[in-house]
Image (spheres, rainbow, N blue to C red):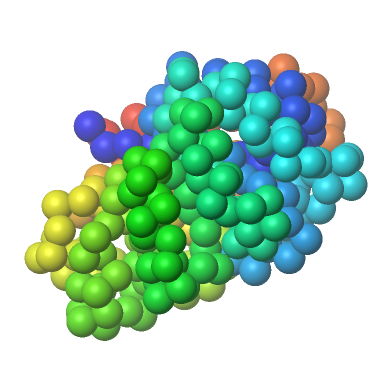
Amino acid sequence: MKNLVAYITSGYPEKSFTIDLALSLAQNGVDSLELGIAFSDPVADGPLIEKANQKALERGFKFQHVLDISEEISKDIDTLWMGYFNSFYRHDFSKLVSHAKDLGVSGFIIPDLPFEEAKAYDSLFRANNVANISFVAPTDTKERIQTIISDAQKFIYMVAYAGITGSGVSEDLQGVITDIREFTTTPVYVGFGVNKKTAKEKVKGADGVIVGSAFIEILLNESTSYSQKITECSELARIIKNEINS
């Protein structure tokens, strides 16, 4: 069974909604949930997620909301925190990783923390049994891939193309995935540009997909009610889970 990871922006449109959506996604095919931490300059994200970040901040998003949400949902769905390093660093990173463990959070996804700099925190993550997810890009050489994934935990985030999330660019990833398989048995999940139309193609050779912009597009539709947003996101999750396993 191939896995589905969903990204949603914490606290958008509000904290209680995020909890309700997360629990519904858990019942509709989502295996792991990335709780996105709103940031003013999300450099790896496309316009949809950037807009959701901005709106969350405008509505008073606080880091405490992520803690509150995690406490409510982590027993029901595998929970990860996705954010930019400054968001974590200014909350005392060493204590935060320990707090994440206590809340049941299984990993961090930090797109602007380079591999070499992340090494400084290896012992911290390991001591708390919390994963720091490794990224591999199609531009990485085979030697670079071997270095990056030598100690990969939980899963490898295979960036589908060199660019930002949601842009829908397509690249042949089979050679890169083959290189990854040569060095590790850690699962490979493909992210960037994955939606209900592309999921079946993107998952070829991989163990799962990561979907963000497709869910955020639903959340940004101001003409729908909260309950409609949850229904539409849950239906999308079911469709994509079926597509990647059919």
Which residue is depicted at the point 52% across and 63% down? 111
| Foreground residue among 142 and 230 | 142
Look at the picture and state if 1 lies above or below 140. Answer: above
- Quadrant of the rendering where the N terminus is positioned: top left
Q: Is residue 160 visible?
A: no
Residue found at the far left of this picture = 182
Q: Position of residue 109 (x, y in %)?
A: 49, 53
| Foreground residue among 170 and 153 | 153
Q: Position of residue 126 (x, y in %)?
A: 33, 49
> What is the number of callouts on the image?
0
Q: Quadrant of residue 233?
A: top right
144 displayed left or right of 24: left
133 displayed left or right of 11: left
| Foreground residue among 111 and 130 | 130
182 displayed left or right of 232: left
Look at the picture and state if 211 lies above or below 119. Answer: above
Q: Position of residue 10 (x, y in %)?
A: 68, 38
Q: Is residue 95 visible?
A: yes
Look at the picture and state if 112 lies above or below 27. Answer: below
Which residue is depicted at the point 75% across and 28% down? 15
Look at the picture and state if 6 lies above or below 137. Answer: above
Q: Position of residue 33 (x, y in %)?
A: 49, 35
Which residue is depicted at the point 27% across and 57% down? 152
Which residue is depicted at the point 37% across and 59% down? 122
- Quadrant of the rendering where the C terminus is positioned: top left
